[in-house]
């Protein structure tokens, strides 16, 4: 079966972000960009399904500016077969991304779609659920284990109280949680090979999708700073302070 | 303005997280807050919901299709009810996060995720970049579909209300997904996200067995036990212990971080706690920069001392 993974280009998770002085957003110029970590897990899971003989082709899709090609190349270097870039310079919000992915999926007809549960930039946690709704497909969010059999997927999900297992009919959308797997690093030969793999480029207009943002960002600010740095010298002093100064125990 | 809050429950009891979403809904819609209880044989939950302070009406959808809150089944019900409401809200728990974007997409609106403040009925503050920035966003959609950061909205009273319970017809099962089973952690301790005191261990705990040192202190304080992602990744404790950007967001009265260095990832999940205590042998650990009370030393010596001291002064 065919698998489709969506990969987002985000500020690298090791970068300490800076809010722009004019409060319009965060600084992205000259900042290291990487694939969203949850999407790396999605690519890895698709690769493992291919290695298990369940998936035979993996398509990596990214949406956004021309540089999203690099994110697709990373997925191809990890082992995905080919890429699709939906190129636009405008802001894309999760609803628009879900609509664009739906359009790509209607052309590609994958049986399984795997994407990260959230992107570490906007922290929305929406795209997978929205995509499955638009397709009328089932969803298995926050996956920590995926078992594919015939026309079903059995997915263990990370929920607040522990784990929950659901069985969903394929085709379906699965979103990844941290413990699903540990993504591999791309080897140098695979990075070289990835340069020759095909990436098709399309646009929201060509796909016939209106991507007008529905949320207007009025401002982006730094959160209030916490005053820390206090020290105590002993356990007795700590308990004392908690009882008499902070009055929390 | 009228708001519908999706109740979170297990068909027997209402989950406390619902009270935080009701608080946010009341800030938006004042007295016009209804609650949807969708489940199977869940009338006791509806009766509990009817007692929540400030709730006008409880809509009860009792149908086998809703027993396990599968998003594929519940979303069409919420969509059907949506025409009477300007705002649909749930708490940003795994259950709310699973359901609400599906509802939003079916209504062709953007969801506003994890709001931490209500500025006006169409404008909200929400943390981005793991809480390292706060975005103020305005929605242009006709219906606002919202998930609420529980710790940002103090819960309303669970009692004092007397709302009417009205049955609503179900929308049936979509037939594309089914519940297989659940392995829920059993604990006598309070739940992480609603506990007044939380004590968490990190990589410095060195093993899962050593968490009993934390548990001893937790029992003296009536605290919940959490962990950093490093401790979860190392296999010391299950993932549902995880406090941080990718785990649970907590904001208790007192947070005690033990053997936790203070990665941005972890701070994102606990930095809104009222009082923070850090115990770590490395005095350069970043956790001390945000701690109100830092104690430098060997946790294997300090934790038993702390348990004894609490015992002595109880």
Image: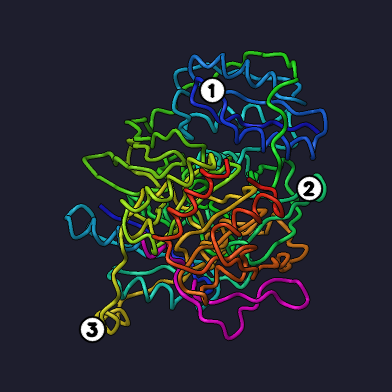
* Chain letter, disc 1 residue: B
Closer to us: B42 or B277: B277
Label annotation for residue B122 = 2
Q: Quadrant of residue A116?
A: bottom left
Label annotation for residue B13 = 1
Relative to residue B287, is residue A245 drawn left or right? right
Query: Which mark sits nearer the N-terminus, 1 or 2?
Result: 1
* Residue A86: x %, y % from top left: 50, 67
Q: Quadrant of residue B174?
A: top left
Residue at the image point whose x is 58% and y is 45% from the top: B197
Helix, strand, or loop for circle 3? helix
| Structural distance between the alpha carbons of marks 2 and 3 | 52 Å
Residue at the image point whose x is 75% and y is 25% from the top: B53
Nearest to the eye among marks 1 and 2: give it: 1
Q: Magenta span covers which residues? A: A13-41
Nearest to the eye among marks 3 and 1: give it: 1
Name the residue that disc number 3 marks. Answer: A189
* Chain letter, disc 2 residue: B
* Residue A204: x %, y % from top left: 56, 63
| Structural distance between the alpha carbons of marks 1 and 2 | 32 Å
Helix, strand, or loop for circle 2? loop
Q: Is residue A165 visible to us here?
A: yes
- Dot 2: few (<14), some (14–19), or many (≥20) neighbours within 10 Å? some
Closer to us: A103 or B161: B161
Q: Main secondary structure of the magenta part?
A: loop
Instruction: Please state, as top left, top right, bottom left or bottom right, where the C terminus of chain A lies in the image.
Output: top right
| Structural distance between the alpha carbons of marks 3 and 1 | 56 Å
User: Do pointers 1 and 2 mark residues of a single chain?
Assistant: yes
Above or below for A94 versus B6: below
């Amino acid at each position: 079966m065919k698998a489709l993974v969506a990969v987002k280009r985000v500020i690298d998770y090791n970068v300490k972000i800076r809010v722009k002085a004019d409060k319009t957003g965060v600084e992205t110029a000259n900042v290291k960009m990487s694939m969203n970590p949850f999407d790396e897990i999605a690519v890895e899971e698709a690769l493992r399904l291919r290695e298990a003989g369940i998936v035979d082709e993996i398509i990596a899709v990214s949406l956004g500016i021309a540089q999203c090609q690099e994110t697709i190349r990373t997925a191809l270097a990890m082992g995905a077969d080919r890429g699709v870039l939906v190129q636009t310079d405008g802001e894309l919000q999760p609803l628009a991304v879900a609509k664009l992915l739906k359009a790509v999926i209607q052309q590609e007809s994958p049986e399984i779609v795997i994407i990260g549960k959230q992107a570490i930039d906007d922290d929305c946690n929406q795209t997978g659920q929205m995509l499955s709704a638009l397709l009328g497909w089932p969803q298995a969010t926050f996956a920590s284990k995926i078992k594919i059999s015939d026309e079903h997927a059995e997915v263990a999900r990370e929920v607040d109280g522990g784990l929950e297992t659901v069985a969903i009919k394929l085709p379906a959308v699965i979103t990844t949680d941290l413990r699903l797997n540990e993504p591999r690093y791309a080897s140098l030969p695979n990075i070289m090979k990835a340069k020759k793999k095909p990436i098709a480029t399309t646009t929201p207009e060509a796909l016939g999708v209106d991507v007008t943002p529905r949320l207007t960002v009025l401002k982006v600010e730094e959160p209030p700073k916490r005053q820390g740095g206090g020290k105590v010298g002993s356990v007795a002093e700590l308990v004392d302070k908690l009882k008499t100064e902070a009055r929390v125990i | 303005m009228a708001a519908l809050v999706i109740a979170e429950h297990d068909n027997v009891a209402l989950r406390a997280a619902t009270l935080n979403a009701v608080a946010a809904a009341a800030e938006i819609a004042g007295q016009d807050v209804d609650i949807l209880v969708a489940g199977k044989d869940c009338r006791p939950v509806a009766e509990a919901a009817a007692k929540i302070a400030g709730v006008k009406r409880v809509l009860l959808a009792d149908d086998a299709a809703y027993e396990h809150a599968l998003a594929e089944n519940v979303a069409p019900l919420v969509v059907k009810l949506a025409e009477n409401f300007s705002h649909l809200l749930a708490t940003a728990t795994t259950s709310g996060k699973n359901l609400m974007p599906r509802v939003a997409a079916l209504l062709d609106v953007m969801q506003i995720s994890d709001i931490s403040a209500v500025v006006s009925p169409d404008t909200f503050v929400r943390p981005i970049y793991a809480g390292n920035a706060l975005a103020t966003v305005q929605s242009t959609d006709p219906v606002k579909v919202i998930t609420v950061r529980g710790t940002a909205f103090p819960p309303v009273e669970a009692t004092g209300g007397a709302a009417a319970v009205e049955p609503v017809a179900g929308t049936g099962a979509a037939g594309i997904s089914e519940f297989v089973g659940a392995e829920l952690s059993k604990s006598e301790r309070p739940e992480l996200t609603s506990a007044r005191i939380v004590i968490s261990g990190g990589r410095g705990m060195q093993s899962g067995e050593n968490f009993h040192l934390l548990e001893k202190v937790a029992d003296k304080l009536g605290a919940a036990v959490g962990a950093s992602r490093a401790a979860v990744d190392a296999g010391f404790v299950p993932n549902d212990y995880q406090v941080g950007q990718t785990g649970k967001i907590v904001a208790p009265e007192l947070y005690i971080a033990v053997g936790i260095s203070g990665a941005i990832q972890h701070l994102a999940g606990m930095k809104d706690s009222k009082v923070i205590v850090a115990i770590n042998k490395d005095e350069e650990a970043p956790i001390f920069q945000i701690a109100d009370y830092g104690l430098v030393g060997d946790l294997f010596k300090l934790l038993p001392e702390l348990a004894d001291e609490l015992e002595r002064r109880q």
